[in-house]
Image: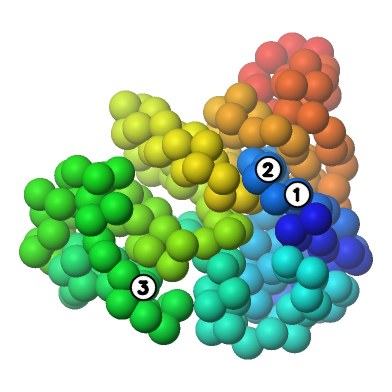
Amino acid sequence: MLLEVKNLEVHYGGIRAVKGIDLEVAEGELVCLIGANGAGKTTTLKAISRLIPSSGTIAYDGNDVSRAKVHELPRQGLAMVPEGRGIFPQLTVEENLMMGAYARGEQRSTEKQYATFPRLKERRLQVAGTLSGGEQQMLALARALMSDPKLLLLDEPSMGLAPMMVTRIFDVVRDIASRGVTILLVEQNARLALELAHRGYVMESGVIALSGKAQDLLNDSRVKEAYLGEGA
């Protein structure tokens, strides 16, 4: 397994936000984590990427990274696209991309990302804060890819985007996965996530309520009723 999480716990003060969950992602897989707002999905990604403290075991690429420093993980090939994109609004598009390369401690060409995101090439000298929401999401994805990750954590990539842009972003995610990049995707749009993924986990109130093949979850009456807007 490229990523193995065991007995992960996260507390915010007296609140137990993530309650001892286990999950795993094999190399080359696209695995989604779905659930309602407040279920603990984003907290889980933040804990895996060491942005917040947690207990339990996080093993990445055969190494225990449970106590790793947050800046060490991108150099090991683990990148995250945070909820809300997290771009540097005062820097240009190209400067943002180079910040992604900096995580690996070396210079990398932007041309590969411009081939994937032609719109970013058109706007490469534009200040990132003036981009549309969809363009900012493209930039956040491209910046993460500049580090040439083995594992990409994606947190709500469709949030706040128009339907046409959501389709475009998910096409890009599908393309990234087809290149062999392993992806753990947190996504509010459960149907889109499950249609894209190999496997899925359903998170409720800090615990994993269901897990299995994505197609099986799409056909599960409990998932249909709770997350797909269909009757039981």
Relative to 196, say whether 11 is above or below.
below
Disc 1: which residue:
26
Q: CA distance from mark 2 to mark 1?
A: 6 Å
Q: Residues within 10 Å of mark 3 (few under 14, many from 20)?
A: many
- Choose top left, top right, bottom left or bottom right for residue 219: top right
Q: Residues within 10 Å of mark 2 (few under 14, many from 20)?
A: many
Residue 29, numbered circle: 2
Residue 101, numbered circle: 3
Please tell me whether mark 1 sits on a helix, a strand or a loop. Answer: loop
Confirm whether residue 65 shows in the render: yes
Which of disc 1 and disc 3 is earlier in sequence? Answer: 1
- Identified by mark 1, the residue type is Ala
Confirm whether residue 37 shows in the render: no
What's the residue at 87%, 74% (across, down)? 56
- Choose top left, top right, bottom left or bottom right for residue 224: top right
- Identified by mark 3, the residue type is Ala
Q: CA distance from mark 2 to mark 3?
A: 24 Å
Residue 76 at x, y percent in the picture: 59, 74
Q: Are marks 2 and 1 in contact (CB under 8 Å)?
A: yes
Q: Are marks 3 and 1 in contact (CB under 8 Å)?
A: no
Residue 212 at x, y percent in the picture: 84, 33
Residue 81, numbered circle: none
